[in-house]
Structure formats: C-alpha cells, structure tokens
Image (spheres, rainbow, N blue to C red):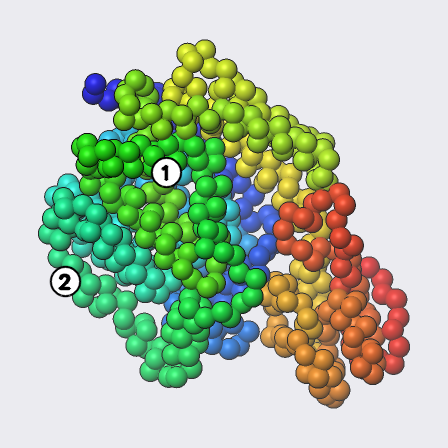
Amino acid sequence: MPPRRFSPSPAKLCLFASVLLFIVLFWRLGSATFWDPDEAHYAQTSREMIERGDWLAPYYNGSPFFDKPALFHVLQASAMLALGPTELAARIVPALAALALVGLTAWAGASLVSLETGLVAALLLAMNPGLFGLSRYAILDTLFTAFTFGGAALLSVAAVRGRRALEWGGYALLALAVLVKGPLALVLCGLTLLVACVWSADARRRLLSLHWAMGLGLVIGLAAPWFLYMLARFGDAFVQGYVLDENLRLYGSSRFANQPGPLFYTQILLVGMLPWTGLLLGRLVDDLRASWRGGAPLDTVEVLLWSWVGAILVFFSGSTFKLDHYVFPTAPALCLLCARAWLEACADPASPRHAGARVGLRLIGPLLLLVGIGASIFVVARLELPRAAIAVPIAVASCGALLTAGRDGRGGASPAALWLTTVAMLAVYGGVVGFAMPALEARKVVPDVARWVAARAETERIAAYGLNRWAPAFRFYVSRPTTFLDDPLEAAAFVRAREPFYCVMTREGLAELETAGLALRVVYEREGLWATSGRALWRRQLPPAHFVVVTRGDSVVAAAD
C-alpha cells in the first residue's frame, strides 16, 4: 500500500509550531541569571573579546582561554555589541542556532524522504528536551550541532539525490563547525561515512561519488588559518592547553573522578526522546528484523540516519569524560527516524514491517499519562513551587489519557498523537519557564553578592575563595578582574598583602581561614542557593549556604543585608 500523505492544515501546523518554538526558545530567555558555570565563563570570555578589541584570541579573566575555537565567542560578542552584555545577548546565539537546526531538520526530511517527514521531524525536534535545555544555555552546543548536522545533511542530499552542488555548502558548514568546537566535527562525519560505507553497498556507491578529498581540502583551507594563528601567537601553551588538554587528554585520560559508565549516553537518548522512546525502539526493532530476515535491505536514508546516531553514540561512550549534552547532535536524526516510523505506521497500520513501531506508538499515551501522574505526586509532595504549578502535570496526564483512550483504537498511530503530545510538551516547558525557573532564581544569591561588590569596589582587589562552580558567575557579575583562590596558603598571601580587597566565600571558607589565623571582617552576607540543580526546589532540601564578603579587619561584625 502506498503511504498516505500526512496533510495537516497549514494554519494548524503554523500555530502549533510558532507557539511551541516561542515557548521553547525565546520566552523569558534573558530573565534568569546564569544557571551553569559554563554560561558565565563563555559570556565573560565574549565580553573580554569586546573589551580587549581582540577578536581572534579568546581570553578569560585576563588569561588566554584555550577551551574552544573563537567563532562562538565572536558571534556571542557581536550579539553583546548589539544588545549589551546581558543574559539575553549571551543566549540569543544558541536560541537562533536551535531555530536554524529545526529548519535544517525540516529541509533534510523533505529533501531525503518527503515534505511530511520533514515537517513532523521538525515538530518532534522542537519539543525535544535537549533542544529546550541547550537553546537556553549560553554555550556552543546548539551552534555546533546546527553546523555539523547541517553539513552532514547537505552532503547526504548531494549523495542520495544527486544534487552535487550542495556538497560544497556541506563542506563549508563543517568548516564552521570546526571553528566552533574543533576537529570533532570531522571525526563525527568521518565515522558516519565509514559506518555507512561498510554497512550498505548503495550508500558506499553514492557517498564515494562525492569529492571528499577536495572537500577536506576546503574545510582545512577555511578552518586551519585560525589554528595556525593561535599556534604562532601562543606556541606550546596552545598545543598543551587546546590540542592536548581539551581534546586528547580530555577524551582518553582519567582527569575527572566519578564519571558515568559506558551506557550513560544510551540512557540519555532513551530519556531524551520521551514520549517517543517506544516509537524509536520499535523502529530499531523493525529495521533489525527486516535486515536479519533477508528481506528488502534498508534504504540509504535509513542507513545514513542510523549510522549518524551510532557513530556519535559509540564515539562519546568511549570517552573517559562524559557530559549529557555531548550526544545532542543525534537528536535531528532520531527525530527523522521517529517521523518516518510514525508516518509509515499511520499509512499502513496492518503491515508486519511496522509491527514494532505500532507497539511503540501505543505507548505514547500511557507514557504521558504515567509521567503526568508521577509529576503530580512529585510537585505536591517534593517540590516547593506555586500551587498553580500543579496544572502542568494535570495537563500532561490529561493529554496522555485522551491519547490512550483514542476512539479509533489506534493509539499513537493517528494525527491526534502529534497534536496532543505537542500540547503536553507545551505545558511542560511553559511550567518550567513560568514556575521552576523563577523559583530557582529566587534562591540564587551569587549574582547579587557580585553586584554588591562591584557597586562598592573602587581600587580594591577582588577575590573569590573556594566558590568552585559559582566562580565564573561571580566573575561575570562583578565585572572586575578577579583572583580565584582555592588553597588556604594562597588566600593567606592574598589577605596579608598591603592593598585593600574584597573577597567572597562561604561561611565554611571563612571559618577555615580564621582557624589559620587570618583576621577578616564580614561586610556583607547572604543566604541562598549552592546547588545548581532541581534539588534546590525540594521541600526537604539541604541547609542553604551562607555567602559572605570579607575584607581585612581585626574582628568579625554583623552585616546589614
């Protein structure tokens, strides 16, 4: 049976997509102070790029910053020039990159499969938790994913559809990805190419028809000048800091303790694709069954999508250092796989080829229902949120119940599944932005402490002792060169110098220094959030931290808030 066309009304599709993207990407984007230390670190680096007038070499707190190449900071600094050094300016680049990624996913699906596949995949990506989280963090992962997946998509369309001119745009996007996060973009695309060529003869024939040698030359020609410039300017410090520390050693050496196990990223992907996880697993089972039974081989598009996901998953699972967002580049391909599975199951509900997908589709409603019920209990019993927040899990559970009790008996294998799931995710993200983020923001005090110091410091030295995760946030909001102290001996040397100072620390840090014989005077004190996770909203949370600002003195006195 030929697939039935999925034709939602243009008005409904535009309404759902526009409201969803506004909530996910832009609503209250700049209202919260920086959540994660990486946000403040990157934003401060971009601000120093403006202040120094040096748009090639990133600096943080007056020292060269070799963590990543300069392109993200150039774009972020440009936004700061236009909007000011604000949270909105720092986050607008990731948000716009996420918007571009949704558009690229729609285009890739339309070009490789069908317009319907592209539209559904774009909507699924727009409601993906990874897109929501990373588009609101002032870090580079959505920009890197947009360039890397965009380049891979252009190359795939060039190979599969014979649109050869597109491959040069693909190489150019990969060069930009290298300038955002380094050669990782080439590693991921190279592994995908290798897997696809080994897997499928048709994929091998089509992919090897492209001009890979010339394309690699183009990528190197566009990206290499910045790396050569940094090597000439900083020499061995750049080799040690960027090439070795931030790439080879970070991937292969055990620099950080308590890292998750090899299945960490598999778990991240399964949770991150909710409530479509069952559909994704069903599609995987259907594809494996089709391959093992010797039937029609998977088409080249399916091979490319699974090769992309598999290459990224295996590569990062092999790293000794793991962060959950590293595998976000798999999200567009996963959404395209789910879109294909959903449309084909809807079009041919009796075909044995889609039996796994049909089972997964029937799980969408029950999963939403269970998530809504569980979240309702959690909001009431564990989270300290406004009473109105209970409306969010109720809305999710209601959508799940309606979908589970669908009149046509097809569960998720109907257009209603798409719209009800979109409504449920709108409720979730609206609740996070409208209830959870303001509640967390009310508990954060480091930005206020930093602003207090900035308003009073003139010629005084500024320091932070033992702030750990919050040191970059303090540096951004104090807007002054800051000495970061972690060792009591360093702190003692700083305090005993003749010049006046302000130093921020916790009460525990103050007690440690006083025990060491240092005479310090508290001039400001605040109680607030130390943890940066949702645990800060638990009703039975750990005692709050006491942040203090100290200066030299013979006694400790109480400070007015």
**Residue 8 lies in quadrant:** top left
Q: Disc 2 residue type?
A: Met
- Between 328 and 453, the one nearer to me in the picture: 328
Q: Residue furthest bottom?
A: 498
User: For the residues marked 1 and 2, what is the alpha-carbon distance in whole angstroms?
Assistant: 31 Å
Residue at left 35%, top 65%? 182
Regarding mark 2 in the picture, which secondary structure is present there?
helix
Q: Position of residue 501 (x, y in %)?
A: 73, 78
Residue at left 40%, top 17%? 410
Q: Position of residue 535 (x, y in %)?
A: 67, 48
As drawn, 295 above or below 257: above
- Between 543 and 91, the one nearer to me in the picture: 543
Q: Quadrant of the C terminus?
A: bottom right
Residue at left 52%, top 32%? 426
Which callout, 1 or 2, points at the residue further toward the start of the chain?
2
Q: Which residue is mark 2?
A: 214
User: What label sits on residue 335 in the rendered view?
Assistant: 1
Is any part of residue 391 visible from this angle? yes
Regarding mark 1 in the picture, which secondary structure is present there?
helix
Q: Residue furthest front?
A: 293
Q: Residues within 10 Å of mark 2 (few under 14, many from 20)?
A: few
User: What label sits on residue 100 in the rendered view?
Assistant: none
